[in-house]
Image: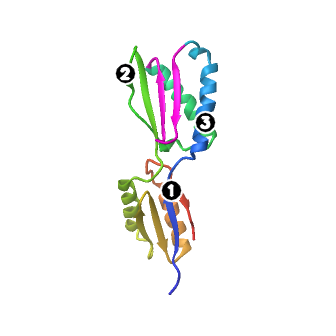
Amino acid sequence: MAKDESFDITTGCDLQEVDNAVNQAVREITGRYDFKGVLADVAFDRQTGKINVHTTDEYKANAIWDVLAGRFIARDVPLKNMKRGDLERATGDTVKQEITLIQGIEGDTGKKIAQFIRDQKFKKVTAQVQGDAVRVSGPNRDDLQTAIRALREEDWGIELNFGNYR
């Protein structure tokens, strides 16, 4: 019996790159004229995978997001894997916002990816959800590469990474 070829579909952010991007953004924000003497607190919690922004108003929160986004792009951290929470009122006429990092494929998205591969009717290509990843296998590498191309053309709301190609 022939050995099946396979690859894994995952998603996530390099936490060290996120940490570096946040540190660079904080340095830029503290040096900007429009933030002089204004509350502009940005903190990255590696354990929970969240970035907390605390500032004076919605305009400043959006300005902080623009700086963060620029730093993330420069460090190849996918913005698709960032989920901005709603602005919440905090004490003393300030606002808080939580940005969550998506580090794995959620169950519903994984099922949609697996169903998409089944719907494409690739020859003997199968997909299985395995925790926060999807394993795609088939007897032919060409079919797997066609599946990767088809997956890249769709918008899944997250950045897909293809690895463990065997």
Residue at 40% across, 14% down: 92
Location of residue 111 with respect to 69 vertically, above or below: below
Which mark's residue is nearer the viewer, 3 or 1? 3
Element type at marker 3? helix
Q: Is residue 112 left or right of residue 165?
A: left
Amino acid at circle 1: Arg
Element type at marker 2? strand
Marks 2,1: beta carbons within 8 A: no
Q: Distance between the residues labelled 2 and 1?
A: 39 Å
The residue carrying pointer 1 sits among few (fewer than 14), some (14 to 19) or many (20 or more) residues within 10 Å by Cα, namely: some
The mark that comes first in sequence, 3 or 1, is 3
Amino acid at circle 2: Arg
Q: Name the residue under label 3.
A: 21
Residue at 48% across, 49% down: 103
- For this orientation, the residue located farthest to the front is 47
The residue carrying pointer 2 sits among few (fewer than 14), some (14 to 19) or many (20 or more) residues within 10 Å by Cα, namely: some
Q: In which quarter of the image is residue 133?
A: bottom left
Based on the picture, tell me whether residue 31 belongs to the magenta stretch.
no
Q: In this view, does 24 lie to the left or right of 7?
A: right
Q: Where is residue 164 in the image (x, y as percent from the top left)?
A: 56, 65
Q: Is residue 30 left or right of residue 154?
A: right
Q: Main secondary structure of the magenta part?
A: strand
Q: Mark 2 points at which residue?
A: 89
The disc at residue 152 is 1
Amino acid at circle 3: Ala
The mark that comes first in sequence, 2 or 1, is 2
Q: Where is residue 57 in the image (x, y as percent from the top left)?
A: 44, 18
Q: What stretch is highlighted in magenta?
A: 38-57
